[in-house]
Amino acid sequence: MPRKNKSLGFTLIEMVVVIIILGILAIIAAPKFINLKQDAQISTVEATGAAFKGGISLANVKWASKGGAGPVDNLQVFGDGTNGQLDINQWGFPAQNYPPFESSPRLNNVNDCMSVWRTIMQEPPVVTSNPNTDGAEYFATYISPDQCRYFYLPEQTMSIYYDSRDGSVITDSDPNS
């Protein structure tokens, strides 16, 4: 009786079908992996904006719990010492962090913007007024009157906006805007 040899390999047609299926999967999956960096940047800006907004709200609540009337100089909002003090403006929102007395503190320059940023968050991302600073993650700008914008340096179309007149914090995390 003749013996039949069984083939243990794949036919050419089977190999072509598998390669086509893998190609289709790669075409579908590749855009998902390409956008991971941008998705991470968006998440970073949104998380930082949420932390900043939470700190602003906490400072406003602390101001309200202390009487909530008019400006307050050197309000101890966080921890102990001058690092946790904020000057609260006439509307009850953080305006700056400077130890000298000021009767009516206002957010009126980029240094004020940076001092609020550094005080309002615990271990905040590094902010600077010079976009070429090594290690900086955000670039602070002052917008007149009483407003700041913090641009995310790796993707400068994304930013966090703060208006000390009403305490609003708006995160713009759309890199296509």
Image (cartoon, grey):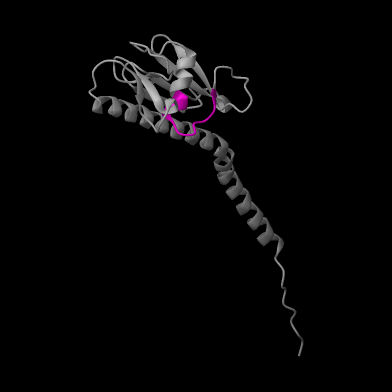
Q: Is residue 26 above or below residue 89?
A: below
The front one of 66 and 93 is 66
Image spot of residue 123 (x, y percent) = 49, 34
Image spot of residue 171 (x, y percent) = 42, 26
In magenta segment, residue 124: yes
Count of numbered tags: 0
Image spot of residue 42 (x, y percent) = 49, 33
Tell me what residue is drawn at x 58 percent, y 49 percent. Answer: 25
In magenta segment, residue 4: no
Looking at the image, can residue 109 be seen? Answer: yes
Tell me what residue is drawn at x 55 percent, y 39 percent. Answer: 36
Image spot of residue 168 (x, y percent) = 34, 22
Q: State the extent of the magenta-drawn residues as a range.
A: 117-127
Q: Quadrant of residue 120?
A: top left
- Quarter containing the N terminus: bottom right
Q: Residue furthest top?
A: 144
Q: Is residue 161 above or below residue 48?
A: above
The front one of 19 and 111 is 111
Tell me what residue is drawn at x 45 percent, y 32 percent. Answer: 48
Looking at the image, can residue 172 be seen? Answer: no
Tell me what residue is drawn at x 30 percent, y 25 percent. Answer: 60
The front one of 76 and 131 is 76
Q: Residue furthest right?
A: 2
The front one of 31 and 27 is 31
